[in-house]
Image (tube, rainbow, N blue to C red):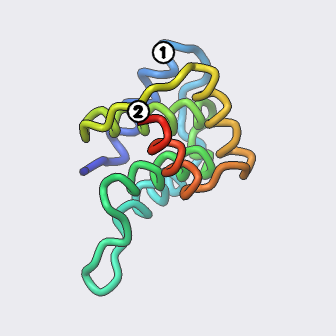
Amino acid sequence: MDITVEDIILMHKILINESGGSHGIRDINLLESAVGRVYQTFMNQEFYNDFEKISVLACGLIKNHAFIDGNKRVGIGMMLYLLKCNNYHIIYTQDELIKLGLDIANDVTTITDLKLWIQDHR
């Protein structure tokens, strides 16, 4: 799984164009931090496998609040996109996704909780 800051900026642009809101990055460093965390290593070993990286990225995008608007949408959108790219098929409702994004933003759902949510929806 290779994802870049530019990929996320493009996803944000698409989501804002489709669903409304404000374009723009509030803090590029926070966006880079969310992406960088996914690729952390220790002694040349990655911290996260591809499945875990999806949860780490989604939570980081939502919680870091790097964009002016649409942080929850881009976090959930990237999660769905990366799951699909990695052949993980989940079943969900729009209401579940809205609640998930809100719960991550409000510290109700952690990275571990998100991994379990994804597994429960397979």
Q: Label 1 neighbourhood size at 10 Å, few (<14), some (14-19), many (20+)?
A: few
Compare marks 1 and 2 and give the one earlier in the sequence.
Answer: 1
Name the residue tied to disc 1.
17
* Three-letter residue code for mark 2: Leu
Q: Where is residue 37 in the image (x, y as percent from the top left)?
A: 44, 63
Which secondary structure lies at badge 2?
helix
Q: Nearer the viewer, residue 38 or 52?
A: 52
Q: Label 2 neighbourhood size at 10 Å, few (<14), some (14-19), many (20+)?
A: some
Please name the residue shown 43% across and 39% down the image. 79
Question: Looking at the image, do the residues carrying marks 1 and 2 touch, with CB atoms under 8 Å apart?
Answer: no
Q: Nearer the viewer, residue 18 or 116?
A: 116
Q: Position of residue 83 (x, y in %)?
A: 34, 38
Is 33 on the left or on the right of 83, as rendered?
right
Cα separation between marks 1 and 2 = 18 Å
Select label 1 or label 2 by which is in front.
Answer: 2
Is 64 on the left or on the right of 53, as rendered?
right
Location of the C terminus by quadrant is top left
The number of numbered badges drawn on the structure is 2
Q: Is residue 92 above or below residue 43?
A: above
Please name the residue shown 45% across and 26% down the image. 91
Name the residue tied to disc 2.
80
Is 22 on the left or on the right of 4, as rendered?
right
Which secondary structure lies at badge 1?
helix
Q: Where is residue 114 in the image (x, y as percent from the top left)?
A: 54, 48
* Three-letter residue code for mark 1: Asn
Q: Position of residue 17 (x, y in %)?
A: 48, 15
Q: Residue lying furthest bottom in this view?
A: 43
Please name the residue shown 47% across and 42% down the image. 118
Q: In which quarter of the image is residue 26?
A: top right
